[in-house]
Amino acid sequence: MSRILLLLLLIRHSESSIDLCPASCSCSMIETHGLIVNCSSRHLSAVPDLPVTTVRLYLQNNQLTTVAPGTLDHLVSLQEVDFSGNPWNCDCSILYLKVWLESQPVQRNPANVQCATPTLTSMKAFQDLTGNEMPRCGRPWPIKCKKFFVRDLYMNGLVVVVLILMSYVARIARKLSCRVAVSPKFPQTTFAKESNKSK
Ligand SMILES: *[C@@H]1O[C@H](CO)[C@@H](O)[C@H](O)[C@H]1NC(C)=O
């Protein structure tokens, strides 16, 4: 009896996973609870609500122009994504999607994830965007650059400390070598020996 209940529960669970499939897409199960969510070529202008269990996400060949920040953060089980063939509008807000895509394990057709607007960026692949195409971006564009700067700051600090230590050591070494040179015993004895030989 309890076994049948468990079986029913399991069936219900896998059903509910499929039930979460966005209305505009088609889904199929993979592995235990993973979903292949196929939303490609559906004239979508917005990313639909996607189930947490999404393992593969196909959104290629739609009318998507932007993705609101945070929209894709809950998709922690993804193995493969395809966002190519959409007329992306590459203003500052596209940064979220660019960074998110770069963090994905497998991106199909990355070269075809391109900007359609504005003019300055059109036909540019996401991977070639540097941020300089968007002169009026309010927020600092490259997060990586900030990290780099902070790391560099530490490195520079370290170099300064090492330089100070080195100059300190050099000063001590100079004092020591001075004392050796001034020391009268050694040169006198050699001189004495030499003068003995010459006699
Ligand atoms: C996704 O759906 C499209 C359109 O219905 C179809 O042509 C394509 O083969 C499907 N792709 C996959 C991986 O199932």
Image: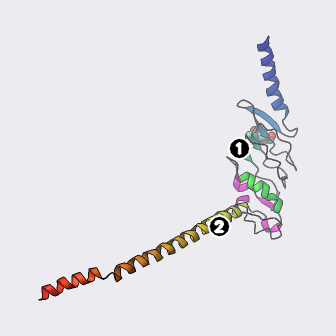
Location of mark 1 (residue): 80
Q: Position of residue 17 (x, y in %)?
A: 81, 31
Q: Where is residue 159 in the image (x, y as percent from the top left)?
A: 57, 69
Q: Residue furthest top?
A: 1
Tell me what residue is drawn at x 17 percent, y 87 percent: 195
- Pair 2/1: label in front: 2
Q: Distance between the residues labelled 2 and 1?
A: 37 Å
Quadrant of the image for the N terminus?
top right
State the SS at label 2: helix
Residue range of the region highlighted in magenta in the rendering: 102-131
Location of mark 2 (residue): 153
Tell me what residue is drawn at x 64 percent, y 63 percent: 151
Q: Does the magenta stretch include residue 108?
A: yes
Looking at the image, is mark 2 or mark 1 earlier in the sequence?
Answer: 1
Amino acid beneath label 1: Glu
Label 2, ligand 1: CB separation under 8 Å: no
Determine the quadrant in which ligand 1 lies: top right
Where is residue 98, by image quadrant? Answer: bottom right
